[in-house]
Image (tube, helix red, strand yellow):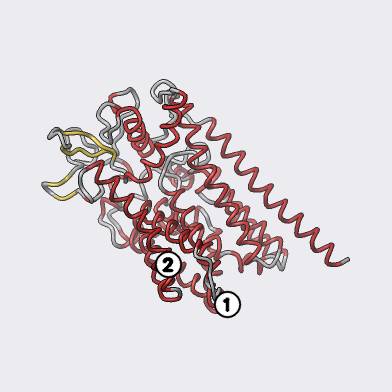
Amino acid sequence: MIEQQEDENQLQGKLVCWLIVALALVNLVAHIAAVRSSNGRLPFFCANDRSRWCTISSLVDHDSYAIDKVIKRRGWDSIDKVRHKGTDGKWHYYSSKPTLLTTMCAVPYGVMNRVFDIEIEDAPFTVVRTSLLLINVLPLLLYFWLLLRLTHELCETAWARMFVVTAATWGTFLTPFSVSLNNHVPAAISVLLTVYAVLKVWNEETPKWRYFVIAGFGAAFAAANELPALSFFVSIAAALLWKFPRPTLIAFAPSAAVILGGFFGTNYVAHHDLRPPYTHRDPGDDWYDYPGSYWIGEKQGVDKGEPSIPKYAFHVLLGHHGVFSLTPIFLLSLAGAVYWLLNDQDRLRAFSLMTLVLTVVCLTFYTLLRPEIDRNFGGVCAGFRWAFWLIPLWLIAMMPVADWLSESRLRRGAAYTLLAISVFSATFAASNPWQHPWMYQLSELLFAS
């Protein structure tokens, strides 16, 4: 009788978690259905996503990575572009974004164009909104499903599971950023996919090789989309090679090599160079130096860069763009990682160590080691987007603390407060993630007054 009651409670808990996920996805789809630029003419938010859509359109419509023809359309031009000579010896404009993800994202439009004769220039809202459903929403569903499975494995209480699932679906910037084409969402999904696969094999004497294939693909794809995630790839590869050398070399490495080949291969086809555009900034080889370039001369707003490193570091961590001020639920993640590091089994101890080290490495790299021009909070966006790929690691690390919080009403109340602030920050950006955080906008209003 008691076991039956426990099974029923567990089933109800799963249903509640899936209801939370479903509501978040319905809300996301509704926002995608309303995607529209500020002037209402196009389904783009800013130069960042517009640059990617220029490449997608050019690939399908003109069989070229050069975007010269596309940027001549009204409202399509972007500051996120570079210029260099093509194979014809003439100067051409290209998106400054890495080519692999954009090439993959061109597939939905390619199908719509070839099968249904739909032109993005004539039906931009249809193409973009449909593509976003396929590119962002479906993978995000996989992300939530994997996270839900991990909560049932790593959380001891139903309250903790529901708290973590609510935080994942409503309290981070991954959901609002899914209304726009970007590299941060696929990178974060790839990180979770990798961690899920590694946790599956870590304590197994005869691990299934398919998980090594998944881990290789996920870790490499994360690094292909977020340069700092290269540290994640190296960490995963080193750990698996140390513990499982044979399947790592035979399954993990070839899977990662496919992504690596795609990254450099598409880049070479596009630019006839193995280095991506953002590495071409040196005098005499500056692809950003062209007539009318936004990147040459005096910048505007946050793009000027913050002269003070301590001030910049404060705002990245606890200020108006703060990881822990906008989304304070991640304070729980730090505590959870430390707890597992000191108290738990081998695989979770290793995971916690990796999470803490990668967090320190990433935040140190972007706050202390970047030149002034790059200390710009990621431009105009609702959160510190360069750390978004760490979100799945932080959500997993949150789980043991969520169990501890569930034990008393006072602790749960504190957790709800942190969650409420995080949900507010994410919801504020739901209709357009390419705007300043609410704390930044509030500080501007207070300062102006």
Residue drawn 42% across the image and 37% down it:
107
Q: Quadrant of the C terminus?
A: top left
Ranked by sequence position, the earlier of labels 2 and 1 is 2
Residue 307 is left or right of residue 335, and the answer is left
Residue 252, placed above or below residue 275: below
- Label 1 residue SS: loop
Q: Which residue is at 54% across, 76% downward?
A: 205
Residue at the spot of label 1: 344
Q: Residue 36, position in %: x, y? A: 47, 29
* Quarter of the image that includes the N terminus: bottom right
Q: Is residue 81 left or right of residue 224?
A: left
Nearest the eye: 398 or 247: 247
Q: Residue at left 57%, top 51%?
A: 171
Instruction: Residue lying at the far right in this picture: please name it.
Output: 1
Between residue 34 and residue 292, name the one nearer to us.
34
Q: Amino acid at mark 2?
A: Ile
Q: Position of residue 319 (x, y in %)?
A: 44, 55
Label annotation for residue 22: none
Front residue of this view, candidates 89 and 278: 89
Residue 117 position in % (x across, y down): 43, 22
| Residue ranking furthest to the top | 122
Nearer the camera: disc 2 or disc 1:
2
Q: Is residue 109 above or below residue 122?
A: below
